[in-house]
Amino acid sequence: MPPIPIKPGIYKIHAHIIGPSSLVTATEYAVKHGAPVIVDRFNPLPIEQEWIIEPAEPVPGSPYVIRLASHDAAGLVIADDKVFVNAVQRSELAKFTFEGVLGGVKILNEKGLALRAGHRGAQIEIVPPKPEFQETWTLEFVRPVDVE
């Protein structure tokens, strides 16, 4: 499927996992490549669960980067087929496209691999895309980037 455009802004990214709502969450403790990114139950402190989705470059059709809304430099990076959040130069952030799928969107990296949430608490992985609900996400628009 062709990529779909996403309105730049601050989002909560919901994983399609059976049970209570699960959100993409930055963990508190960094390891070699940054802080692991997992899916977890809604956290009353939204700073680890609100993400800025914006074009990587100011040109039409550009892929997107995903950054923590609470930290200007911290964004998603991929290492060892897993997703981390780390404060790196913008050029080092992972780039993503979005495809519409039944029930939500599929998030794909530059190599066409899909983000996958195996279960609540597991680190998000990138895998060859398959029609599985663990690779389906819902983007909940919270507010524009410049509104606090």
Image (spheres, rainbow, N blue to C red):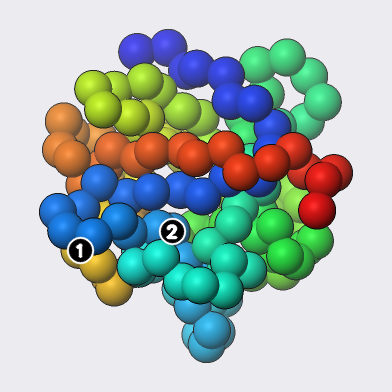
Label 2 secondary element: strand
Q: Pick the residue in front: 96 or 81.
A: 96
Looking at the image, residue 19 sits to the left or right of residue 69; the answer is: left
Query: Residue type at mark 1?
Result: His
Give residue 99's mark. Answer: none
Instruction: State the separation of the CA atoms marked 1 and 2.
Output: 12 Å
Give residue 24's mark. Answer: 2
Q: Residue placed at 28% from the left, 38% from the top?
A: 136
In this rendering, does residue 37 appear at all? Answer: no
Residue 114 is situated, as x and y percent measured from the top left of the image, at 34, 40
Mark 2 burial class by Cα count in 10 Å: few <14, some 14-19, many 20+:
many
Query: Residue type at mark 2?
Result: Val
Residue 130 is situated, as x and y percent measured from the top left of the image, at 18, 34
Sequence-first disc among 1 and 2: 2
- Locate residue 81: give its quadrant: bottom left
Mark 1 burial class by Cα count in 10 Å: few <14, some 14-19, many 20+:
some
Q: Say if mark 1 contacts mark 2, CB within 8 Å.
A: no
Residue 17 is situated, as x and y percent measured from the top left of the image, at 20, 53
> Count the marks: how many?
2
Q: Residue placed at 63% from the left, 35% from the top?
A: 64
Q: Which residue is mark 1?
A: 119
Looking at the image, residue 99 sits to the left or right of residue 86; the answer is: left
Label 1 secondary element: loop
Q: Residue placed at 40% from the left, 58% from the top?
A: 23
- Locate residue 118: give its quadrant: bottom left
